[in-house]
Amino acid sequence: MIHIDRHRSPRDLLPKIDHLFALSAGKIRSIEESWRPDAGAPVFTVQGRYQARGWTEWTQGFQFGSAILQFDATDDASFLELGRSRTVERMSPHLTHAGVHDHGFNNVSTYGNLWRLTREQRIATCEWEVRFYELALKVSGAVQARRWTRLADGGFIHSFNGAHSLFVDTMRSLRALALGHVLGQPLMEEQDEKISLFDRLVQHARATARYNVYYGKDRDRFDVRGRVAHESLFNVANGTYRGPSTQQGYSPFSTWTRGLAWAMLGFSEQLEFLNTVPDDAFERCGGQDEVVATMREAARATCDHYLDIAAADGVPYWDAGAPGLASLDGWGDRPADPFNDREPVDSSAAAIAAQGLLRLARVLKDDRYEQAGLRVLDTIFDEPYLSTDANHHGLLLHSVYHWPNGWDYVPPGARTPRGESSQWGDYHAREAALYVKRLAGNAPYLAFFGPA
């Protein structure tokens, strides 16, 4: 359980944030200088060097989006040029990739961040450049929305596993649909059927809240409030729910903590977005009150569960039900141990979850969530999580990718992975740092949709 050992303000973290971005600059440049584009996208490090894993290239947007965040935090125009040029040169295949659920990761991190900076008047652009970003986001939102499995009461964006599979991760990809909706883009189907991206956003969030999040009552009366299933399975012939599953967690009946973090941030961020949506947009979705209440309950349940299952310093182990935790006496009442030989921690889950806690704190005006989020970041923005070695490509150490599949590097003499980084962990550490930096400086609030 997270221990709030003292009261923190966003300003208290500024020295660590400045140090993080000073280190971040060298990491970004090092990857850019050494990476071969034909290798695909960097995914995670092995002995400190980023490696590709040719799958869906879902981390490409984090690579170039990190340069854009670096500019946002430091005003170093060389990183803006790097992020902007690489987005134009290399990101277009991701706009029309119909086989993945990751459009929010790839395209909102790149085209979306650039469009946001234009709306905030942080960068000088011509009208056609702005239209270019908007066209990219319209295409991405519509392509993501078409990856659809129908249910009796709505539907969901199915994962790359197939039409039967609802991933909790996709809550954060809903940003692609949100931006497409903001820009007035519908999905056009057969015989000119016009489908609202906002309707599909709401239906997907509702399905995730109903099937992937547990509440400790009714269907879930034998379960724990806030637990999250990585995947929900459906019979696509008639749309009936069949049961929970997992790809990267320990079991369908335990909580993979990065999946929990995706839900925390995804629901909290969408609650912020809903505050900007006109009332009449909710008419076909059951009304504003019902939609907001559903997302609010999912956000609160998942954030509360994270407070319970993270270690005292705010960093979680990779799965709340991982069997080796039974051998780590009192693990929940002391700081996480990234060097133990029983179960790995996942700093990337911490970076994602912290932002979810902070955003929910703003929505609910609840200081408890803000203090928890700042506690998490105070931990991971320092050693042994912050990578101070200039020869290590990664920024945030002790991230885990896919421990059940054995994709994570285990150093000689150890039994669990440690000391490595991931593109999503590094990106979300930068994004959380930028978020808090803006809060501390009373700068414009950082939201994917820009100024309301």
Image (tube, helix red, strand yellow):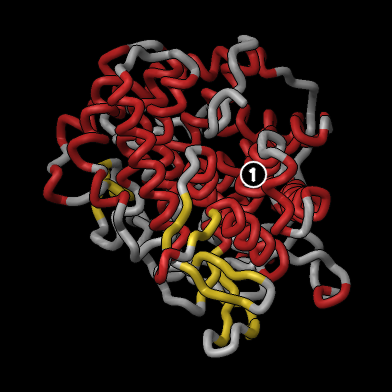
**Camera-nearest residue between 228 and 89:** 89
x then y, percent, for residue 37: 14, 44
**Camera-nearest residue between 387 and 219:** 219
Three-letter residue code for mark 1: Gln
**Camera-nearest residue between 223 and 382:** 223
In-image side of 153 versus 21 (left or right): right
Q: Which residue is drawn at 38% across and 35% down?
A: 134
Is 425 drawn above or below residue 285 in the view shown?
Answer: above
Is 224 drawn above or below residue 362 in the view shown?
Answer: below
x then y, percent, for residue 163: 46, 77
Q: Residue at x 24, y 51 (%)?
A: 93
Q: In which quarter of the image is residue 301?
A: bottom right
Res 441 seen here: yes
Res 357 seen here: no
Q: In which quarter of the image is residue 394?
A: top left
x then y, percent, for residue 109: 41, 38
**Camera-nearest residue between 275 and 21:** 275
In the picture of the structure, the residue carrying the numbered disc 1 is 270
Q: Residue at x 30, y 55 (%)?
A: 96
Q: How many labels does the image show?
A: 1
Q: Residue at x 42, y 74 (%)?
A: 161
